[in-house]
């Protein structure tokens, strides 16, 4: 790496600073700007003049103050200590900032290290002297909290023969852990790795997305599933449920690691996660969710350049755990704020604007971001798989999906979870528009659902979708002629569709039981509704009237089935299914006439 | 709170006087610095006009040669040869102390109540700093506003930012004033204060608020910052920041619970647009700058609670939607930042319903954690869901009836239709001075649900347990239902 260069400030305009005397600088190099050493990154080079985006407020900076080029790109530090942490957009730990400054407000110029350098971690070697290793090979493990086994890997660019490795014991992240000999030279390697955030970490090979990431959310898993390693976009106007959905994904996805990026959104929402996650129990591990989670919080009022960087910082942490062989789920709320940060910086650079003032490279930046998702074979001697699944919230102005960020995102992502203002206004939550949303993973995931859930799963789902479609058509007719004009057979469809909507798709994130459904419970709930629909048609053909059917006690059970705890679901739902199966027209007619008899007697 | 020390000493200050304005454009003044002393980004300039008049401004961009100064009072009457500019080496600050209470300031922070400037405890930079998200405490304390629709369906929480989306001719001022009057938490009035920031509203409106505060005997617990319609538009950029700086001081240094009313944020955004246009920036939607979101966030996010501090800041921005259009950039971006919104509706207003709150698109995002047993009452959540649902269904039917007539409705449909009317008449509608307790409000809701003869079947959003305990038909006349803890 090149040595330090010292230049001088030429011009200051908000988060953008120009400096001259910077010959020899490279793009994305980190600089210390001004006498306070504010952190910034070079985003344009013209001769000896560099343009720098500064990650902190620039008030009070003077022209001619010094600028130091550090020679290094904006990098993430990777080692034990990441899990459970909350960082700002450039990996400064927020708790540490608070502790160091004793100030509840973030002032600028705070220098903190991303990780604790003097903390000792229990390292257990898993290879011996003499082993041949390549990049990505695991040479030992550290238990990082109660859940995550942190696999210490040979960093990118290193390979050879292990000439020595420490015994099991406690080491800091910067202690040399092992030595590698290659072509006669020997290298000391600590646990700590650094990686420039704007570049994806290398992998061996991409794999087909054939396994779903289960989220416990019925509308996602059953109707529009996402694959491990897949990408999804969740656009919606304000108040339609982007953040609650992302929180639900962070809570209940069956990923081993979760990276949650609060990018330009509310401070309180991050606080909410910080307060909830240590208390909520991960159904997969039985441990608090915080023990598998990393948070990045660069809220709307924090510096906009650091917001731009935050998604890359989060992504790099995700890739690091993917390389260990984990399934990582990454959420970014909201990618629109990231795009706006790009727009703001681009405007200050006086670049030629594209659509809606966004820079012309918006589309390629979005594409590059989602391209870092995937299920992969990692670089390593042994065969290992890991994945990153991305869900990006999109906040279209006015809730209008035709704007550039939504459109460019939808060109890349394979799952579209469209939020609907209309459904949200009816408190149909999650307000996912079931007629507009789609998943492009159906073919790849079908074998998994048929095998792991039920061979009939896909058929039932199609039937449910068809009912919803038909429901829409009928509703349009009702709007013109009123509900009474429909024949009874079509009213049955409306009832069945209502059940799918209210008793299946609606899922209350804030109800302890309803918040999360196992895939088995989802399947049985779906089966209950579709079987009941078919039973309704059968009964109808045998002369039972719809209002009579709607008075059956089974209706209440269907309404309440979402509140059956997951562990009891299989038993109780099997009971409901048996009850449906046993319904006979004769019984119903008998019972009604029986009731009429008793009513008569009362009179 | 700490401050960054100024780098400019008194000696350099005298060298920082310029008579070298090169261009005047809209609210902006361009000054040739002649490569002389350093002038820092964001600092304040004092400008002396040929007439002797003084104005102030702030640096928006600076290089070795040129400073771009934004004039708060506009540039009229300025010329390029006579105007003197002095840079004072500091960013904009507000002198604060607990004596702020009861005072009235201009939109620039100068006292306009005929009293002397306050003796400052400290001077604080008005741009503020972001609260460390790790230092925040999630807001969970219910504020009783005495307005049924708010307390029942869109509960206001201490530390929340909840705007009123309104439009010209609607009674947003009345609603805001009623909230300010009634929101003093019982038993804690002493810790309660209001900061009121006016941006471009009329003198009459400002007077209305003053009278309202006076009426409730609270004028000595109010700080006013007034930029009125005929005051300089660019000044509006700093008015809300002054107000929030005062609020932060009173909340976080003096342990008070603050309600900050900011009105009208649409006027604020227009001033921002004017500056953007003068700088020839690439505009975003409808000519507003692309950074409008971040800028609004730098205001709205100055609300909340902080761990270990007693005081809180609750924000109630008022903004008018041009053409009643909620997708206009100002309401739209505000809704993306604030923790819900209360939407006023012209239709309800025309029908004489006060407060004309449009229930459908209104929302309080912080409500869910601030209600329920121990906070308001156990039945609150489910009752609110049920009322909301029943009203929405009634409105749908109302629209349907308009097309196909009443004949095709079922008996049940008729009940929902009737419910919607009564809901508007009794639940939403209330007096301008009527202060209802949360229990009264919830029980009005229960009374309306008596319409439904088969509650367990028809009131699906309420669990059987709650119906058995709270439904008017099931109440025990010896029991006290006015309690958070039952
Ligand atoms: N799955 C859900 N269950 C219950 N309520 C929900 C759900 N999703 C959204 N909501 C409601 O909608 C409100 C807004 O959701 P949020 O995710 O904050 O919207 P956005 O991020 O799109 O602005 C929440 O405060 C909550 O009241
Ligand atoms: Mg959100």
Image (cartoon, grey):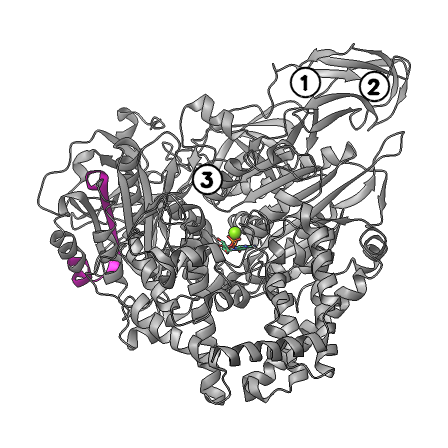
Residue at 32 percent across and 39 percent down: it is B312
First in sequence, mark 1 or 3: give its number. Answer: 3
Give percent across and percent down for residue A265.
Answer: 50, 47
Q: CA distance from mark 2 to mark 1?
A: 17 Å
Magenta segment boundaries in residue numbering: B189-207
**Farthest residue toward the front?**
A601
Give percent across and percent down for residue B127.
Answer: 35, 40
Q: Are marks 1 and 3 in contact (CB under 8 Å)?
A: no
Q: CA distance from mark 1 to mark 3?
A: 38 Å
Q: Which mark is residue A12?
A: 3
Q: Which residue is mark 1?
A: A173
Is residue B265 shown in magenta? no
Q: Residues within 10 Å of mark 2 (few under 14, many from 20)?
A: some
Secondary structure under badge 2? Answer: loop
Give percent across and percent down for residue B100.
Answer: 18, 39
Determine the chain carrying the residue at label 1: A
């Amino acid at each position: 790496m090149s040595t330090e260069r010292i230049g001088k400030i030429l011009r200051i305009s908000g988060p953008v600073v120009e400096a001259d005397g910077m010959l020899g600088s490279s793009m994305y190099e980190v600089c210390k700007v001004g006498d306070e050493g504010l952190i910034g990154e070079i985003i344009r080079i013209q001769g000896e003049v560099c343009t720098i985006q500064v990650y902190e407020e620039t008030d009070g900076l003077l022209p001619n103050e010094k600028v130091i080029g550090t020679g290094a790109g904006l990098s993430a530090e990777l080692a034990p200590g990441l899990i459970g942490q909350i960082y700002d957009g450039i990996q400064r730990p927020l708790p540490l900032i608070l502790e160091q400054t004793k100030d509840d407000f973030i002032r600028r110029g705070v220098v903190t290290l991303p990780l604790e350098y003097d903390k000792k971690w229990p390292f257990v070697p898993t290879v011996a002297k003499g082993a041949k290793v390549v990049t990505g090979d695991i040479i030992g493990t550290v238990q990082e909290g109660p859940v995550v086994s942190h696999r210490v890997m040979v960093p990118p660019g290193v390979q050879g023969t292990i000439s020595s490795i420490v015994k099991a014991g406690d080491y800091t992240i910067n202690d040399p852990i092992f030595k590698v000999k290659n072509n006669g030279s020997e290298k000391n390697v600590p646990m700590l790795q650094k990686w420039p955030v704007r570049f994806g970490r290398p992998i061996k090979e991409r794999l087909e997305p054939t396994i779903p990431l289960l989220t416990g959310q019925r509308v996602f898993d059953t109707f529009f599933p996402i694959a491990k390693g897949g990408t999804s976009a969740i656009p919606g106007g304000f108040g339609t449920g982007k953040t609650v959905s992302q929180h639900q994904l962070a809570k209940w996805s069956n990923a081993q690691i979760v990276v949650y990026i609060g990018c330009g959104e509310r401070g309180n929402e991050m606080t909410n996660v910080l307060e909830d996650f240590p208390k909520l129990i991960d159904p997969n591990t039985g441990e608090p969710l915080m023990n598998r989670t990393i948070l990045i919080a660069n809220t709307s009022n924090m510096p906009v350049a650091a917001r731009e960087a935050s998604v890359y910082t989060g992504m790099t942490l995700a890739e690091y755990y993917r390389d260990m062989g984990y399934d990582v789920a990454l959420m970014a709320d909201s990618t629109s704020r990231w795009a706006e940060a790009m727009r703001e910086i681009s405007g200050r650079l006086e670049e030629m604007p594209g659509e809606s003032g966004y820079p012309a490279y918006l589309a390629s930046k979005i594409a590059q971001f989602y391209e870092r998702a995937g299920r992969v074979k990692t670089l390593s001697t042994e065969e290992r798989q890991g994945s990153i699944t991305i869900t990006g919230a999109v906040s279209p102005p006015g809730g209008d999906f035709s704007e550039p960020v939504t459109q460019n995102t939808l060109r890349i992502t394979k799952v579209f979870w469209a939020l609907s203002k209309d459904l949200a206004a009816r408190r149909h939550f999650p307000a996912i528009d079931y007629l507009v949303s789609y998943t492009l993973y159906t073919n790849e995931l079908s074998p998994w659902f048929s095998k792991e859930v039920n061979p009939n799963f896909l058929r039932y789902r199609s039937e449910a979708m068809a009912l919803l479609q038909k429901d829409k058509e009928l509703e349009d007719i009702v709007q013109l002629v009123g509900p009474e004009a429909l024949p009874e057979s079509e009213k049955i469809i409306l009832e069945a569709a209502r059940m799918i909507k209210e008793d299946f798709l609606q899922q209350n994130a804030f109800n302890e039981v309803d918040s999360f459904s196992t895939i088995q419970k989802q399947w049985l709930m779906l089966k209950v509704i579709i079987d009941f629909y078919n039973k309704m048609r059968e009964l109808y053909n045998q002369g039972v009237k719809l209002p009579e059917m709607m008075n059956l006690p089974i209706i209440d059970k269907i309404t309440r089935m979402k509140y059956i705890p997951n562990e009891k679901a299989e038993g109780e739902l099997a009971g409901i299914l048996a009850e449906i199966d046993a319904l006979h027209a004769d019984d119903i007619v008998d019972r009604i006439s029986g009731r009429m008899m008793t009513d008569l007697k009362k009179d | 709170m700490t401050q960054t020390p100024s780098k400019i000493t008194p000696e350099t200050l005298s060298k920082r006087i310029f008579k070298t304005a090169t261009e005047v454009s809209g609210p902006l003044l361009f000054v040739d610095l002649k490569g002389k002393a350093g002038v820092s980004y964001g600092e304040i300039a004092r400008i002396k006009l040929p007439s002797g008049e003084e104005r102030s401004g702030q640096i928006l961009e600076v290089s070795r040669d040129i400073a771009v100064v934004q004039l708060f009072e506009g540039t009229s009457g300025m010329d390029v040869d006579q105007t003197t500019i002095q840079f004072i080496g500091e960013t904009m600050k507000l002198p604060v102390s607990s004596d702020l209470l009861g005072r009235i300031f201009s939109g620039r922070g100068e006292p306009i109540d005929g009293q002397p400037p306050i003796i400052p405890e400290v001077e604080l930079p008005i741009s503020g700093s972001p609260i460390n998200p790790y230092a925040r405490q999630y807001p969970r304390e219910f504020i009783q506003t005495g307005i049924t629709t708010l307390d029942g369906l869109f509960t206001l929480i201490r530390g929340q930012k909840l705007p009123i989306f309104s439009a010209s001719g609607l009674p947003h001022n009345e609603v805001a004033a009623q909230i300010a009057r009634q929101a003093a938490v019982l038993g804690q009035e002493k810790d309660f204060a209001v900061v009121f920031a006016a941006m471009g509203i009329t003198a009459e409106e400002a007077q209305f608020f003053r009278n309202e505060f006076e009426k409730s005997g609270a004028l000595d617990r109010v700080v006013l910052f007034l930029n009125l319609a005929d005051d300089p538009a660019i000044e509006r950029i700093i008015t809300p920041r002054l107000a929030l700086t005062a609020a932060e001081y009173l909340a976080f240094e003096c342990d008070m619970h603050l309600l900050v009313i900011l009105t009208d944020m649409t006027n604020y955004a227009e001033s921002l647009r004017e500056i953007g246009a003068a700088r020839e920036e690439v505009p975003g939607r409808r000519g507003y700058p692309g950074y409008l979101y971040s800028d609004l966030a730098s205001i709205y996010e100055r609300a909340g609670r902080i761990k270990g501090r007693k005081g809180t800041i609750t924000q109630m921005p008022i903004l008018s939607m041009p053409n009643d259009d909620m997708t206009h950039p100002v309401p739209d971006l505000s809704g993306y930042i604030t923790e819900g919104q209360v939407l006023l509706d012209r239709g309800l207003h025309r029908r004489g319903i006060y407060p004309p709150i449009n229930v459908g698109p209104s929302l309080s995002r912080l409500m869910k954690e601030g209600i329920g047993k121990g906070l308001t009452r156990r039945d609150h959540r489910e009752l609110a869901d049920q009322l909301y649902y029943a009203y929405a269904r009634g409105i749908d039917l109302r629209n349907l009836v308009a097309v196909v007539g009443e004949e095709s409705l079922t008996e049940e449909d008729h009940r929902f239709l009737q419910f919607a009317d009564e809901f508007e008449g009794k639940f939403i509608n209330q007096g301008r001075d009527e202060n209802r307790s949360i229990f009264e409000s919830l029980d009005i809701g229960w009374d309306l649900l008596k319409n439904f003869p088969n509650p367990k079947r028809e009131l699906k959003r309420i669990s059987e347990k709650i119906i058995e305990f709270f439904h008017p038909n099931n109440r025990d006349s010896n029991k006290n239902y006015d309690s958070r803890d039952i």
